Image (cartoon, grey):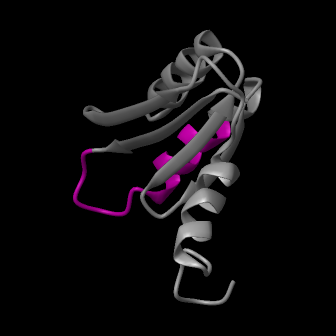
Amino acid sequence: MTVIALLSVAPVVEDSMSSEIAKAVDALEAYDVEYETNPMGTVIETDDIGELFAAAQAAHEAVDHDRVSTVLKIDDKRNRDTNAAAKVEAVEEHLGRAARNKDE
């Protein structure tokens, strides 16, 4: 996979956002992307930048609120295939340990 992105979609509200965020994450299922949600956003991987933009738009539109904040950060490596796991492994190689301080 060559396109890796960090997507954060959230309604601008005072109360819990989890049910609306769940709608955004669920919208990704309709697209040819791999994703993993973490506490700060969702990492998305795909071979096609168009598919990424379509998935991000669907996630944004899935949040049913008066005001929605969306951030999309893209790493589009065009000269070689890579994936999010390889990027983490490269950092861990330099660290000489896992890139976290808790056991999973």
The image shows a total of numbered marks equal to: 0
Could you tell me residue 41's position as x and y percent? 46, 51
Could you tell me residue 29's position as x and y percent? 74, 33
> Residue drawn 61% across and 38% down?
44
> Residue drawn 34% across and 34% down?
70
Q: Is residue 49 above or below residue 63?
A: above
Could you tell me residue 90's position as x and y percent? 61, 58
Q: Is residue 101 above or below residue 35?
A: below
> Residue drawn 25% across and 51% down?
13
* Residue 48 located within the stretch drawn in magenta: no
Q: Is residue 61 above or below residue 45?
A: above
Judging depth in this view, the residue of 35 and 80 nearest the camera is 80
The quadrant of the image that shows the N terminus is top right
Q: Which residues are magenta?
A: 12-26
Could you tell me residue 85's position as x and y percent? 69, 53
The residue furthest top is: 50
* Residue 22 located within the stretch drawn in magenta: yes
Judging depth in this view, the residue of 59 and 17 nearest the camera is 59
Majority secondary structure of magenta residues: helix
> Residue drawn 52% across and 35% down?
5
In the rendered image, which quarter is residue 55 located in?
top right
In the rendered image, which quarter is residue 89 located in?
bottom right
Judging depth in this view, the residue of 32 and 78 nearest the camera is 78
The quadrant of the image that shows the C terminus is bottom right
